[in-house]
Image (cartoon, rainbow, N blue to C red):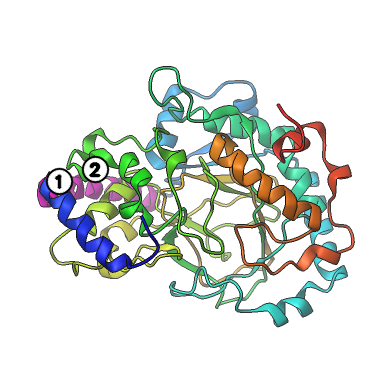
């Protein structure tokens, strides 16, 4: 896949896929399966039950999670893990982060650098209240904590991480730090949401040879054979370079709550259906879509799920359940997610974005670029070069890394 002449590549790729399979029949049968999933999500919502599975960190720690619970997480593609951190710890990190922001004059600098990050420019709501900070003490302490390490090991093992035979796609028990940002959303805000979307590539999901292997069964019309948690070929994907397009392989996107938040608080919404991506893939290959388009997908941008083409899927868009400081939320990279446009709650809605990026060749390669940014206090290389923290007082340095943190950041070998 080349970043040049994307429309022509779309035309040629669609023609090739259509020669391989009856994609109209496959889409029709998948749509019926999706309708059942959407109906189940709506039924749970109406009954007051969260469609997003909820687990307790203590049960995970004591290995009390049942196979049925594991299967439900795979089916929904997302999970809330409660009480990963004590409320007191999360509150302390929140206070430390607020002090870091205010003491270093972040707001004044942000006004001068607006416009550098264009990743969400195609979405309905343009700029969430997300801070371009990567190296605060709060973030680094949480990333290198044993609590998150244990949680991510468990989550990684929900994947089939063997490629063929005994070859591992990734090591589920070793983690590479992926430096992401923080959200601090003030009550009353009504302009800073995010429309439904997926990260980890847009047009790449159809055009890239790695993704074509990941979704081979779907593109061959055999969507029933597709396994969302099969890792084979996931690390072979190549993304179109663009700020905020993740160049690591993440088994999950995720965040850690620093404040109480839930429905109506300007926070996360999910479509908790693992069949979402196969359905979106086949939707773009139907005859009513212009030959050189993929339901509005744009290179170098988030992949939008929109009412024009994906209204059935969006019927299942649901807010996460109420979470408390120290709870964590995780979702598969192929899960549609959004942020509520309106924050009608009474308090700040604050999170640290910390996902799961297991040890593999792809992630180790990116780790070296990220390590250089960390040493210089610059923005993570996956994001716009805003570089707020170069001269920030209190920024985390190598001396703040624990033995585990040094391994996760690539300073020491495992």
Residue 100 vs residue 13, the one in the foreground: 13
Q: Which residue is mark 1?
A: 26
Task: Indicate the position of residue 90 as horizontal and vertical percent values.
Answer: 76, 48
Give the x, y percent position of residue 392: 85, 64
Is 294 included in the stretch rendered in magenta? no
Judged left or right of residue 119, residue 351 is right
Element type where label 2 sits in the image: helix
Q: Is residue 22 left or right of residue 362?
A: left
Q: Quadrant of the C terminus?
A: top right
Q: Residue at x 59, y 29 (%)?
A: 153
**In the rendered view, would you say 347 is above or below 92?**
below
Residue 387 in view in this figure: yes
165 shown above or below 368: above
**Contact (Cβ within 8 Å) of mark 2 with mark 1:** yes
Q: Residues within 10 Å of mark 2 (few under 14, many from 20)?
A: many
Nearer the N terminus, badge 2 or badge 1? 1
Q: What stretch of residues is rendered in magenta?
A: 20-47
The chief SS type of the magenta part is helix
Q: Residue at the location (69% across, 69% down)? A: 386
Give 223 or 269, whichever is nearer the viewer. 223
Residue at point 28%, 65% (across, down): 295
Residue 80, given in percent of the width and then of the height, sits at 55, 42
Callout 1: few (<14), some (14-19), or many (20+) C-alpha neighbours within 10 Å? some
Return the residue at label 2: 218
Quarter in which the N terminus is drawn: bottom left
Count of numbered tags: 2
């Amino acid at each position: 896949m080349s970043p040049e002449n994307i429309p022509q590549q779309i035309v040629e790729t669609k023609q090739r896929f259509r020669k391989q399979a009856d994609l109209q029949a496959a889409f029709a049968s998948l749509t019926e399966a999706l309708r059942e999933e959407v109906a189940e999500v709506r039924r749970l919502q109406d009954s007051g039950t969260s469609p997003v599975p909820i687990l307790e960190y203590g049960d995970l720690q004591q290995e009390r999670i049942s196979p049925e619970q594991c299967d439900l997480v795979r089916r929904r593609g997302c999970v809330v893990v409660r009480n990963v951190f004590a409320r007191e710890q999360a509150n302390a990190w929140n206070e430390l982060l607020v002090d870091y922001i205010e003491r270093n004059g972040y707001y004044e600098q942000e006004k001068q650098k607006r416009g550098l990050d264009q990743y969400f420019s195609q979405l309905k709501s343009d700029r969430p209240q997300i801070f371009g900070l990567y190296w605060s003490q709060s973030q680094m302490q949480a990333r290198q904590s044993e609590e998150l390490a244990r949680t991510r090991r468990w989550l990684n093992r929900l994947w089939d991480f063997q490629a063929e035979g005994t070859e591992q796609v990734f090591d589920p028990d070793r983690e590479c730090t992926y430096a992401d940002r923080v959200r601090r959303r003030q009550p009353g805000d009504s302009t800073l949401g995010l429309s439904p979307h997926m990260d980890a590539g847009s047009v790449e999901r159809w055009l890239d040879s790695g993704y074509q292997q990941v979704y081979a069964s779907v593109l061959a019309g055999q969507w029933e054979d597709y396994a969302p948690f099969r890792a084979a070929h996931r690390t072979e994907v190549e993304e179109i370079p663009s700020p905020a397009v993740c160049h690591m392989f993440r088994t999950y996107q995720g965040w850690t709550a620093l404040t109480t938040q839930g429905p109506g608080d300007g926070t996360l919404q999910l479509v908790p259906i693992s069949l979402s991506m196969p359905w979106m893939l086949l939707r773009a290959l139907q005859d009513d879509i212009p030959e050189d388009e993929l339901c509005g997908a744009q290179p170098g941008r988030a992949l939008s799920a929109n009412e024009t083409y994906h209204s059935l899927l969006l019927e299942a868009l649901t807010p996460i359940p109420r979470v408390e400081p120290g709870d964590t939320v995780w979702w598969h990279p192929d899960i549609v997610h959004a942020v509520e446009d309106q924050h009608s709650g009474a308090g700040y809605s604050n999170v640290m974005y910390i996902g799961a990026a297991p040890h593999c060749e792809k992630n180790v390669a990116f780790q070296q670029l990220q390590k250089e940014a960390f040493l210089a206090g610059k923005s993570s290389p996956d994001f716009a070069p805003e570089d707020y923290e170069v001269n920030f007082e209190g920024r985390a340095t190598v001396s703040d890394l624990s033995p585990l943190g040094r391994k996760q950041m690539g300073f020491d070998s495992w």
